[in-house]
């Protein structure tokens, strides 16, 4: 997969299938070895659906990833973690390649594929491949944007020193969040601009770590996907597509503000992956420290700025409320 994502030239269908097959053949011996142990084995004799967690950054995803690693050891499944966090909107070529990889996974091992990436419908032409199960977790849109705003700067400073910034880059790095909102800077608006969809630009961010690649929120695309309307921020069509996918293509979408309800639904709806989730969370809470913590601290924002951003992120809030209704409907069904 890493080799595929690095390439910008189109590959033929047989090349994509060969990449996925070769990747799984290389671990086949190890998988068969699991089957000879007393522990549960991730190897499967019948094709099964793979679980895809196309996680949204700064929405409790590191917490859930840690829990998946822990539960994978107990329940006997593999956790496959994608590497390219800045590459989220895939080319048609890479969507097909990923589909072949996951198809191979479904015949070889119970697996959870975890990656920051926009939703992919593999059943549509030209892919016509098996569709995995999807889950995700969302967060209050303004809180998410505020956390992401400072965390992105934290990550950039892990790769570059302040002295290396050009004047324009330094201005982007140092601008207070409220200034970004008031002056309608690119990160703090939600219409009139698109997000990164060009593969070369997405991968370039990992090479240059330039603040110029800090674009508006792309949360809706994690549910809307790769339809052309999805990258038009504020599009009513994109919102309806996202709702449709939440209803029909996501087994569970949780909310960070309602973590207890989210874990109950995950454990009951997907026991093959989340049985014992509540207990695992209690155990982890006693020992684990916070990961992916912001070193560039977020400041308190005024009620006026929050109100403005709620208006600008109205599409995300409508989706958030829609997801909340579905989550609590699932939760009440379990309780009753």
Image (cartoon, rainbow, N blue to C red):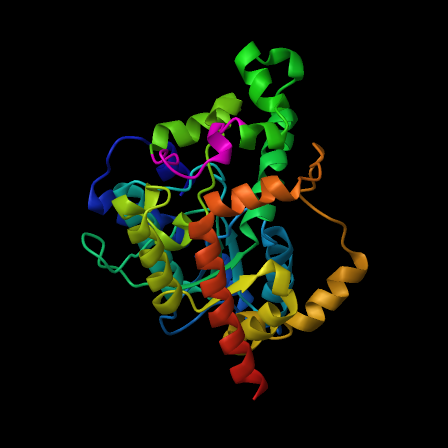
| Residue ID at (29%, 57%) | 122
Q: Residue furthest front?
A: 304
| One can see residue 251 in this view | yes
- Is the residue 248 above or below the residue 118 in the image? below
Residue 66 position, x and y percent, is 64, 56
Let me know if residue 149 is in the magenta part.
Answer: no
| Front residue (pair 86, 186) | 186
Q: Is residue 311 left or right of residue 261?
A: left
Q: Nearer the viewer, residue 45 or 73?
A: 73
User: At which x and y percent is residue 261?
Assistant: 61, 71
Q: Give the residue at x 38% y 53%.
A: 119
Quarter of the rendering occupied by the N terminus: top left
Percent of width and height locating residue 129: 26, 59
Q: Is residue 37 visible?
A: no
Furthest residue to the right?
Answer: 286
Instruction: Give percent across and percent down for residue 103.
Output: 33, 60
Name the residue: 46% across, 29% down.
Answer: 186
Magenta stretch, residue numbers: 183-197
Location of the C terminus by quadrant is bottom right
Q: Nearer the viewer, residue 233 or 308?
A: 308
- 184 within the magenta span: yes
In the rendered view, tell whether residue 268 sits above or below residue 161: below
């Amino acid at each position: 997969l890493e080799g595929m994502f690095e390439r910008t030239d189109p590959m033929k269908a047989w090349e994509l299938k060969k990449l996925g097959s070769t990747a799984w053949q290389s671990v086949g011996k190890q998988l068969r070895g699991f089957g000879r142990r007393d522990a549960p084995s991730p190897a499967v004799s019948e094709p099964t659906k793979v679980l895809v967690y196309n996680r949204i950054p700064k929405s409790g995803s590191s917490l859930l990833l840690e829990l998946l690693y822990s539960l994978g050891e107990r329940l006997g499944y593999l956790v496959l973690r994608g590497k390219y966090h800045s590459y989220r909107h895939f080319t048609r070529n890479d969507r097909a390649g990923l589909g072949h990889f996951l198809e191979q996974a479904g015949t070889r091992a119970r697996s959870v594929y975890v990656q920051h990436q926009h939703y992919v419908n593999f059943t549509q032409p030209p892919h016509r491949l098996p569709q995995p199960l999807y889950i995700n977790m969302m967060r209050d849109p303004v809180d998410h944007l505020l956390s992401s705003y400072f965390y992105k700067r934290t990550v950039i400073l892990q790769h570059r020193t302040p002295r290396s910034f050009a004047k324009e880059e330094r201005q982007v790095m140092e601008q207070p969040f409220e200034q970004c909102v008031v002056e309608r800077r690119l990160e703090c608006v939600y219409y009139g601009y698109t997000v990164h969809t060009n593969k070369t630009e997405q991968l370039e961010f990992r090479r240059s770590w330039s603040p110029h690649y800090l674009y508006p929120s792309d949360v809706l695309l994690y549910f809307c996907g790769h339809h052309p309307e999805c990258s038009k921020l504020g599009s009513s069509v994109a919102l309806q597509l996202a709702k449709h996918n939440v209803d029909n293509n996501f087994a569970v979408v949780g909310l960070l503000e309602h973590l207890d309800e989210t874990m109950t639904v995950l454990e009951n709806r997907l026991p093959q992956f989340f049985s014992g989730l509540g207990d695992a969370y209690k155990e982890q809470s006693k020992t684990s420290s916070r990961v992916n913590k912001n070193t560039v601290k977020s400041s308190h924002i005024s009620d006026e700025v929050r109100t403005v951003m709620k208006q600008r992120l109205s599409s995300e809030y409508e989706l958030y409320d829609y997801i909340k209704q579905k989550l609590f409907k699932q939760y009440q069904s379990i309780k009753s």
